[in-house]
Amino acid sequence: MANPHTTATVEHAPAGSEHAEASVFGFNAGGWVALAMLFVFAILLMKKVPAAIAAALDRKIESIRGQLAEAEDLRKEAEALKAEYAAKAAAAEKEAAAMVERARQEADALLEKARLDADALVERRSRMAEEKIAAEERAAVQKLRSAAAEAATRAAAALIADKVDAKTDSSLVDKAIEELGR
């Protein structure tokens, strides 16, 4: 026997269909699922779940925006550091080039000074050698003159000794005395 309070009806499928669909209070299974979904959505709305989800999403968005802003700041700092270090590297390169140029100029100056000093030393040594040679020549000439004078003196003494006798000697002495008296 059927319960008069139950309103469940079983509809019979038209001839040719294979099974019949059950319905309760006029809703089939799909209707009940839709009604349950509406009920769940109503509860969620009453509990303000969408607002909580939206607030959570807003917080997450703000967090991400903060992270993006921080990343942008870090990128700007990194670019500033990169530019600073590039400027320092360029300055260091210029300074190194200037140091190399100064070193080259100093080396050239040292080479020029060494060349001038060497030339002066060679000239001084040449002058000293020439002076020494000239002094040796003068000494040799003086020796030759002394030797020639000594040889001439000996030769003259020998000639005088051979040619002058006592008589000639007395006449030469008389003549010299006579010349002194005048």
Image (cartoon, rainbow, N blue to C red):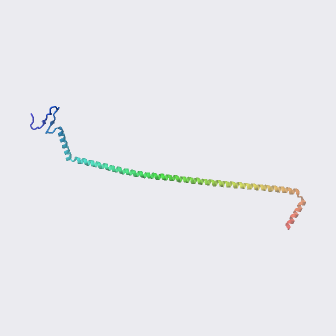
Foreground residue among 110 and 161: 110
Foreground residue among 172 and 14: 14
Q: Residue at x 89, y 62 (%)?
A: 171
Q: Quadrant of residue 11?
A: top left
Quadrant placement of the N terminus:
top left
Quadrant placement of the C terminus:
bottom right
Q: Residue at x 82, y 56 (%)?
A: 152
Q: Quadrant of residue 109?
A: bottom right
Residue 16 x/y as whole percent: 16, 31
Residue 173 x/y as whole percent: 87, 63
Q: How many marks?
A: 0
Q: Is residue 103 left or right of residue 65?
A: right
Q: Is residue 46 left or right of residue 119?
A: left
Q: Is residue 62 left or right of residue 175?
A: left
Q: Residue at x 50, y 52 (%)?
A: 97
Q: Quadrant of residue 10?
A: top left
